[in-house]
């Protein structure tokens, strides 16, 4: 009833809670995260080293050395990315009920601090350019072409002859340093006598990615509602740099939507004016609309089913789902009806199905 009448199955309540955090708690969790972050920085450093070696190998024309340097560069890029993924999950883990090191305080502080930093960053960016998309850990924006980007400073240090400073990055980092430094951070220096040393601590930094060729954000379907976490970002060479929230990335989505989205994204890069861009996108959209309106009259059935069927895997056995309802459970039950129960007795059954329009009004699971 709730699902039909209110389009909701649960009510979210907001409540205020107050807690005190001691600077002299056992800091093992923070230490673990810090050690993990430092290891990622090691790999990032090695990635830069091998990138330089690769450039040198290209200049010398040694094919074997180029291949070796390329492999090492890919290896360290993969390692730093793997560490980044795990680093990002430390926060989600801490606020998950049932986690061994569950701490609502830690999650709250991270969330609150992050939200404040991004809000202030947005206010600053708004004065210079235009913010496009805000995330918990970053901000996508357009800055004027005349805005300073990188400054290269020459140094007397033989190991680092030049230092590159990103102006937008430095600008945001000053904001973070001034507003979010913890001046009473306590660190245990002598565990035997419980001696602590107090210092200022701030390890939050903005890194600048880009500039990129283009960023495509879909418009909202309803007034007053905003679309979150859906965007495509392109590199200068036209390749995809980042893709968030689109069906292209999701498992089991309709092939029709995936192919349509992939081709539409590329179409956005064609043309030099807005009208030309829309015309090239419309061409792609028209082709797929023709397929839908003509009910794929000019397409073989096998190809059509490839486009409109969905794939899902069942992690458990059919009987373990009990009274639950889902499209894959309905598919498995129908398979059992005409192929026998032996077909569905094991876990990991891969279901492939098409959702029909009729009987109209009945739930999707029955269609």
Image (cartoon, helix red, strand yellow):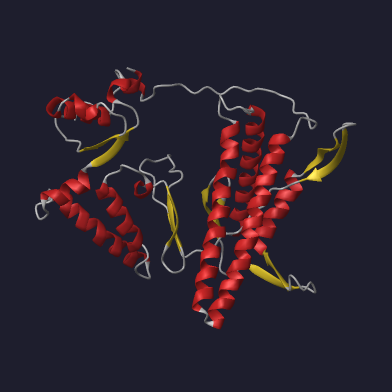
The answer to whether residue 148 of the structure is visible from this angle is no
Query: Residue at left 67%, top 34%?
Result: 109
Query: Residue at left 66%, top 39%?
Result: 113
State the residue in front, 298 or 270: 298
Give the side of residue 214 with respect to residue 355, left or right. Answer: right
State the residue in front, 56 or 274: 56
Report x, y in % for residue 358. 14, 32
Quarter where residue 47 is shown: bottom right
The answer to whether residue 123 of the structure is visible from this angle is yes
Quarter where residue 185 is shown: top right
Report x, y in % for residue 232. 42, 55
State the residue in front, 323 or 277: 323
Q: Is residue 57 above or below residue 164?
A: below
Query: Residue at left 72%, top 35%?
Result: 28
Give the side of residue 239 with respect to residue 291, left or right. Answer: right
Residue farthest left in this picture: 297
Location of the C terminus (image quadrant): top left
Location of the N terminus (image quadrant): top left
């Amino acid at each position: 009833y709730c699902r039909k009448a209110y389009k909701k199955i649960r009510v979210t309540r907001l409540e205020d809670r107050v807690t005190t955090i001691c600077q002299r708690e056992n800091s093992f969790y923070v230490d673990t995260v810090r050690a993990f972050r430092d290891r990622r920085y090691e790999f990032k450093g090695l990635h830069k080293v091998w990138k330089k070696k690769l450039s040198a190998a290209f200049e010398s024309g040694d094919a074997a050395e180029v291949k070796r340097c390329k492999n090492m560069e890919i290896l360290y890029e993969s390692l730093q990315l793997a560490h980044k993924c795990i680093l990002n999950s430390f926060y989600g883990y801490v606020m998950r009920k049932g986690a061994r090191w569950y701490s609502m305080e830690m999650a709250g502080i991270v969330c609150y601090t992050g939200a404040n930093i991004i809000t202030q960053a947005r206010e600053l960016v708004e004065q210079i350019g235009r913010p496009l998309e805000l995330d918990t850990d970053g901000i996508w924006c357009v800055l004027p072409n005349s805005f300073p980007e990188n400054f290269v400073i020459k140094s007397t240090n033989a190991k680092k002859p030049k230092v590159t400073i990103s102006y937008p990055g430095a600008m945001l980092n000053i904001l973070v340093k001034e507003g979010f430094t913890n001046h009473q951070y306590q660190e245990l220096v002598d565990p035997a006598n419980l001696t602590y040393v107090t210092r200022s601590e701030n390890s939050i930094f903005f890194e600048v990615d880009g500039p990129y060729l283009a960023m495509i954000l879909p418009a909202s379907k309803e007034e007053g509602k905003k679309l979150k976490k859906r965007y495509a970002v392109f590199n200068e060479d036209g390749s995809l740099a980042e893709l968030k929230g689109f069906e292209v990335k999701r498992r089991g989505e309709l092939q029709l939507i995936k192919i349509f989205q992939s081709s539409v994204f590329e179409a956005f890069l064609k043309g030099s004016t807005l009208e030309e861009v829309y015309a090239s996108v419309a061409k792609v959209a028209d082709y797929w609309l023709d397929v839908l309106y003509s009910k794929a009259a000019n397409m073989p059935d096998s190809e059509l089913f490839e486009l409109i069927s969905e794939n899902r895997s069942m992690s458990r056995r059919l009987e373990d789902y009990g009274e639950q309802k889902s499209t894959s459970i309905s598919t498995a039950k129908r398979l059992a009806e005409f192929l026998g129960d032996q077909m569905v007795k094991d876990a990991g059954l891969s279901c492939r199905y098409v959702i029909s329009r009729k009987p109209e009004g009945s739930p999707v699971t029955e269609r």
